[in-house]
Image (cartoon, rainbow, N blue to C red):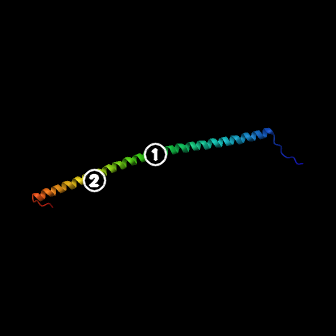
Amino acid sequence: MKNEPTVTKPMLDDAVTDIANIISDFSNRVDERFNKIEEDIAQLNKKYDHLINTLDAFLKRLDDLEADNTARDAQLARIDRWVHQVADKLQIELS
C-alpha cells in the first residue's frame, strides 16, 4: 500500500475555516458593491425626478403661452374687424 496523505481533523477544520473566510470576504465585497449600486440608482432617480419636474413646468409654461397667444390673436382679429367696420362706415380706405 502506498503512503497516501492523511487528512486530520485539524487540517480539515483549517480548510473549512479558510473557505468560510473566503466566502465571507467575497460576500462582503459583493454586498458593498450592491450598496454602492443602490446609492447610485437612488441618486439617478432623484436626478430623473428633478428632470421630469423641470420638463413638466416648462411644458406648462409653453401651454400657458400658447393659450395666451391664441387669445391675443383672437382679440387682434376682432379689433382688426372693428377697425375695418368703422373705416367702412366713415368711408375711409385702409391700406
Furthest residue in direction right, as rendered: 1
Residue at horizontal 13%, vertical 56%? 86
Furthest residue in direction left, as rendered: 90
Q: Nearer the viewer, residue 42 or 4?
A: 42
Name the residue tied to disc 2: 70
Disc nearest the viewer among 2 and 1:
2
Name the residue tied to disc 1: 47
Q: Nearer the viewer, residue 79 or 50?
A: 79
Residue at horizontal 27%, vertical 53%? 70
In the image, taking residue 11 as reference, residue 76 lies left or right, namely left
Residue at horizontal 42%, vertical 47%? 52
Please provide percent x and percent y for residue 45.
48, 45
Asked if residue 87 is positioned above or below residue 60 in the image, the reply reads below
What separation in Å lies between label 2 and label 1 (alpha carbons)?
Answer: 34 Å
Please provide percent x and percent y for residue 77.
21, 56
Please provide percent x and percent y for residue 53.
41, 46
Does the residue at mark 2 contact the one at mark 1 (Cβ under 8 Å)?
Answer: no
Location of residue 10 by image quarter: top right
**What's the amino acid at mark 2?**
Thr
Q: Nearer the viewer, residue 75 or 19?
A: 75
Locate the C terminus by quadrant: bottom left
**What's the amino acid at mark 1?**
Lys
Task: Please tell me whether mark 1 sits on a helix, a strand or a loop.
Answer: helix
Location of residue 90 by image quarter: bottom left
Task: Please tell me whether mark 2 sits on a helix, a strand or a loop.
Answer: helix
In the image, taking residue 59 as reference, residue 36 lies left or right, namely right
Q: Residue 65: which numbered mark, if any?
A: none
Which of marks 1 and 2 precedes in the sequence? 1
Total count of labels? 2
